[in-house]
Image: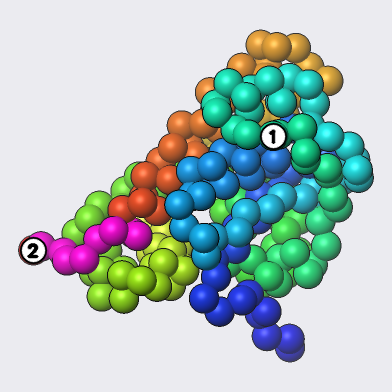
Amino acid sequence: MNASVATPGRFRVLTVCTGNICRSPLAEYLLRKGLERWDVVDVASSGTGALVGHSMTDQTIAIAHQHGVPDPERHRARALVVEHLRHADLVLALSREHRSEIVSLLPRGSRHTFTVRELARLLEAVQAADLAAVAALPLADTAARFSELVHTAAALRGYVTPPENELDDDVIDPYRRGDDVYQQTVEQLVPAIDVILDRFKLAAAITSVEG
C-alpha cells in the first residue's frame, strides 16, 4: 500500500463536485480567501465528471465576486484523479454521491473526507474545550493544528445527531438551472463554509483549554 504523500508542514484542502465549474470552485475560492492569512494552506478543486478546461459559469463568477473573491475568472476545471486525493489532508465533497466516489478511489482517505455541510455540522459541535489536543501543538505549526481539528471532527461521526433529511448534507447542483437554484446553492454552501472557517481560525489561535 502506498503511503499518503500529503506534504509535511503544509495543509492541503481539496473540494470536489461533478463538473468543477459551479459548486467545488466556489467552495475552493471561498476557503482560499478565508484561509489566506496562513501561507501553509493550499486549496484546490476538481470534478468527478469535470468539464476540463472550462471556467466557472457566469452565475458562479458573479456570486464569487459578491463574496469578495478576487479573480474567479482564472479558474479552469480539472478532472479528479487519485493523486489529488493522496495529496490532500482534507477532502470536501459537495454531495454524498461525490463523497462515495472519492472514497471508492482512495478508501483510506475516508476519515478526512466529508461533505462540506457534514463537516460544518460536526465542527459546529466543537467548542474550545474540545480542542485540548490542538492547543497542545506548537502555535507556529498551523498545518498540524488544522490536521488535528479534522481528526477531532472525524471522531464525532456517530455522536453528532445527523440531519433528519440526508439531503441536508448535500449542496444542490445549480448547473444549467435558474438563478433561484444558484441562490439556494449559496444559502446551503456559504453558511457551511463560514462555520468551517470559524473553527479553523479557533484551531490556529487556541493556546489553552479550561475545564
What type is the residue that disc 2 sits on?
A: Gly
Q: Is residue 15 visible?
A: yes
Residue designated by label 2: 211
- Relative image position of residue 30 (x, y in whole percent): 57, 39
Q: Main structural element of the magenta stretch: helix, strand or loop?
A: loop
Mark 1 and mark 2: Cα distance apart in space: 45 Å
| Vertical placement of residue 53 versus 57, above or below | below
* Chain-order first, disc 1 or disc 2: 1
- Relative image position of residue 9 (x, y in whole percent): 52, 76
Q: Nearer the viewer, residue 6 or 171?
A: 6
Residue in the image at 70% along x and 12% along y: 179
- Relative image position of residue 154 (x, y in whole percent): 45, 62
Residue designated by label 1: 71
- Relative image position of residue 8 (x, y in whole percent): 56, 79
Residue in the image at 33% along x and 59% along y: 203
Residue in the image at 62% along x and 54% along y: 43
| Vertical placement of residue 29 versus 208, above or below | above
For the N terminus, the quadrant is bottom right
Q: What span is colored magenta in the figure?
A: 203-210
| Vertical placement of residue 93 versus 187, above or below | below
| Vertical placement of residue 4 versus 118, above or below | below
